[in-house]
């Protein structure tokens, strides 16, 4: 039998091939490969990079200016998301508070500590007294649908224009209510930590009483009975606003200090200012009969 040489192991062959290929050559990085060639456009590279840095600085300064000056007028997405954090149990309990506010207590909102150690309001899911946007938005949509249904039943045909008319009426009422509250806060020097979304939410709760009144008309209630339902819905909404907006118009100093980063806005309210603010609060409650009366006339 002839002598057979054994084959060298596979790893030994790979080591020999690596030694033959020479030392490792570093590859260019991806960032360097995709770096724009300013020289091809006749622009100096250093000047172009300086211009890019100035542009980024200008954009950052503009974002900071908008946030500082318009952050309270145009709420961020996180604030809107906070007001949509609801549950089924919260919606049912909130509707009961809106329709029967006389039996509800306490009315003070709850505070929690954030991940950064700052004090903030609890979400609607955790606090029944926290304003939300889910119920107002759903109530406005329901109001528009009921208005179209009422028009179709009475006129025997459906007009698509009624949807736009009812939506415009609802939007106008909400904006007027919002403007009245914000102007009152401005002239009375009410600097509170409430957000713009809170005022819109409180203004949208009136549609729950409006829906109850319109539904009573669908059920056949006419004349004094339907008027009685409307008066009850108005009184319930007015009482709810009196108790809910009180924390904004006449804030508790201890709660204001905990939730307001600016200590200058928590000054003590003197008796004259307190009387004017209470008068403004009652005017806001009385104005609801005008808003709701305009909405139920469909």
Image (spheres, rainbow, N blue to C red):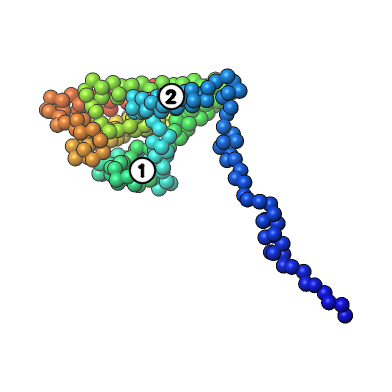
| Tag 2 near tag 1, CB within 8 Å | no
Q: Give how far across and how far down residue 182 sits, in percent.
A: 30, 24
Q: Give how far across and how far down residue 208 sits, in percent.
A: 39, 34
The quarter of the image holding the C terminus is: top left
Q: Residue at x 62, y 46 (%)?
A: 25
- Residue 18 position (above or below residue 276): below
- Mark 1: secondary structure: loop
The residue singled out by tag 1 in the image is 123
Q: Categorize mark 1 by other alpha carbons within 10 Å: few (<14), some (14-19), many (20+).
A: many
The quarter of the image holding the N terminus is: bottom right
Task: State which tag comes first along the sequence, 2 or 1.
Answer: 2
Foreground: disc 2 or disc 1: 2
Nearest the eye: 258 or 249:
258
Tell which residue pokes out farthest to the bottom in this image.
1
Nearest the eye: 112 or 50:
50
Q: Residue at x 74, y 68 (%)?
A: 8
**Left or right: 229 with respect to 2?**
left
Q: Give how far across and how far down residue 53 sits, in percent.
A: 45, 27
Q: Categorize mark 2 by other alpha carbons within 10 Å: few (<14), some (14-19), many (20+).
A: few
The residue singled out by tag 2 in the image is 54
Quarter of image, res 78: top left
Q: Residue at x 69, y 59 (%)?
A: 16
Q: Is residue 229 visible?
A: no
Q: Which mark is residue 215?
A: none
Q: Is residue 78 visible?
A: yes
Quarter of image, res 83: top left
Q: Give how far across and how far down residue 57 sits, in percent.
A: 41, 26
- Mark 2: secondary structure: helix
Nearest the eye: 24 or 282:
24
Q: Residue at x 62, y 49 (%)?
A: 24
């Amino acid at each position: 039998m002839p002598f057979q040489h054994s084959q060298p192991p596979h790893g030994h062959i790979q080591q020999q091939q690596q030694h033959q290929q020479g030392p490792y050559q570093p590859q260019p990085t991806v960032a360097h490969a995709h770096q724009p060639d300013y020289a091809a456009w006749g622009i100096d590279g250093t000047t172009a990079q300086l211009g890019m840095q100035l542009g980024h600085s200008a954009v950052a300064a503009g974002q900071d200016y908008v946030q500082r000056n318009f952050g309270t007028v145009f709420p961020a997405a996180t604030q809107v998301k906070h007001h949509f954090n609801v549950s089924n149990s919260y919606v049912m309990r909130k509707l009961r508070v809106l329709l029967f506010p006389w039996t509800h207590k306490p009315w003070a909102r709850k505070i929690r500590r954030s991940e950064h150690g700052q004090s903030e309001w609890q979400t609607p899911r955790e606090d029944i007294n926290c304003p939300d946007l889910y119920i107002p938005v759903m109530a406005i949509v329901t109001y528009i649908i009921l208005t179209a249904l009422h028009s179709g039943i009475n006129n025997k045909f459906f007009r698509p224009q009624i949807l736009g008319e009812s939506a415009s009426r609802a939007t106008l009422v909400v904006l007027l209510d919002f403007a009245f509250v914000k102007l009152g806060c401005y002239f009375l020097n009410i600097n509170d930590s409430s957000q713009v979304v809170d005022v819109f939410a409180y203004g949208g709760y009136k549609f729950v009483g409006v829906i109850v009144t319109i539904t009573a008309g669908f059920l056949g209630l006419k004349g004094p009975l339907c008027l009685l339902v409307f008066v009850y819905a108005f009184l319930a909404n007015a009482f709810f606003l009196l108790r809910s907006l009180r924390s904004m118009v006449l804030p508790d100093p201890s709660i204001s200090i905990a939730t307001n980063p600016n200590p200058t806005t928590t000054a003590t309210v003197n008796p004259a200012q307190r009387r004017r603010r209470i008068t403004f609060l009652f005017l806001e409650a009385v104005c609801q009969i005008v808003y709701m009366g305009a909405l139920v006339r469909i």
